[in-house]
Image (cartoon, grey):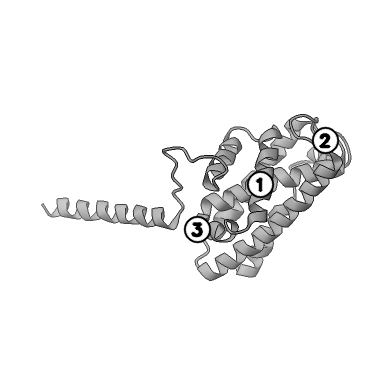
């Protein structure tokens, strides 16, 4: 059984580490120019690892420890994002206008923003009750995430599933108006409704079998 301490270290590691899939992709952090498309491949791979990490947290039975783990993760996540934003702003990097950075330091800050913004999206969509309890009351985090979503949307990194994630998380935290059919199936309320619906189906099936 995975202990909360081990899980916490693993989850924190995926906030700041970028994964290279082969020797060619390791050039990403060797100071050499990396095309945007190559970075997007790495981004997709890292997204897979992040999502698995969040799913493991979803399955953690101890709600008290889960809350503590999410709190620690968000503290670290927003610290990383804040430092990256400060650096990118200081360097004058503007996503969507400036080309994909070939400078290793700028590229690292760029990566930290888009990857940790996506990680926050996984957390707030899959653990909404816990994350909202910590995030909604923190005005600094709200303002920072607004900037990060803007940066990510303009970065040209998010497309397909990741672009959908960005849209859903923006609705979830009220950065944009919720669509009429928007529903987060992972809220405690909706989970209970789903469980009750399944019970009702089973009960109906039992009655039919008796008849």
Residue 165: name its quadrant. Answer: top right
- Residue wearing tag 3: 129
- Mark positioned earlier in the residue sequence (2 or 1): 2
Image location (x, y in percent) of residue 10: 67, 60
Q: Give the residue displayed 26% in from the left and 51% down from the top.
A: 201
Mark 2 closeness class: few <14, some 14–19, many ≥20 residues within 10 Å: some
| Tag 2 and tag 1, C-beta contact below 8 Å | no
6 on left or right of 88: left
Residue at 70% from the left image edge and 53% from the top image edge: 15
Q: How far apart are marks 2 and 1 (CA)?
A: 18 Å
Q: Pointer 2: what residue? A: 101
- Tell me the SS state at disc 2: loop
Please determine whether, in this image, residue 116 is positioned above or below residue 41: below
Label 2 or label 3, whichever comes before in sequence order: 2
**Left or right side of 14 for 32:** right
Of callouts 3 and 1, which one flags the residue occurring earlier in the amino acid sequence? Answer: 1
């Amino acid at each position: 059984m995975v202990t909360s301490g081990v899980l916490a270290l693993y989850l924190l590691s995926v906030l700041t580490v970028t994964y290279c899939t082969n020797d060619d992709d390791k050039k990403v952090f060797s100071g050499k120019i990396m095309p945007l498309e190559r970075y997007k491949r790495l981004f997709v791979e890292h997204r897979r690892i992040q999502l698995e990490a969040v799913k493991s947290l979803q399955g953690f039975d101890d709600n008290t420890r889960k809350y503590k783990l999410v709190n620690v993760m968000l503290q670290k996540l927003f610290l990383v994002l804040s430092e990256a934003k400060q650096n990118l702003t200081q360097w004058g990097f503007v996503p969507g206008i400036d080309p994909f950075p070939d400078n290793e330091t700028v590229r690292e800050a760029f990566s930290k923003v888009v990857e940790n913004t996506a990680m926050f999206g996984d957390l707030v969509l899959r653990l909404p009750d816990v994350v909202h309890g910590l995030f909604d009351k923190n005005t600094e985090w709200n303002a920072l995430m607004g900037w990060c979503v803007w940066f990510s949307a303009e970065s040209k990194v998010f497309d397909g599933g990741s672009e959908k994630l960005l849209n859903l998380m923006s609705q979830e935290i009220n950065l944009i108006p919720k669509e009429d059919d928007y529903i987060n199936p992972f809220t405690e309320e909706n989970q209970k409704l789903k469980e009750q619906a399944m019970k009702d189906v089973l009960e109906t099936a039992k009655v039919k079998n008796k008849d």
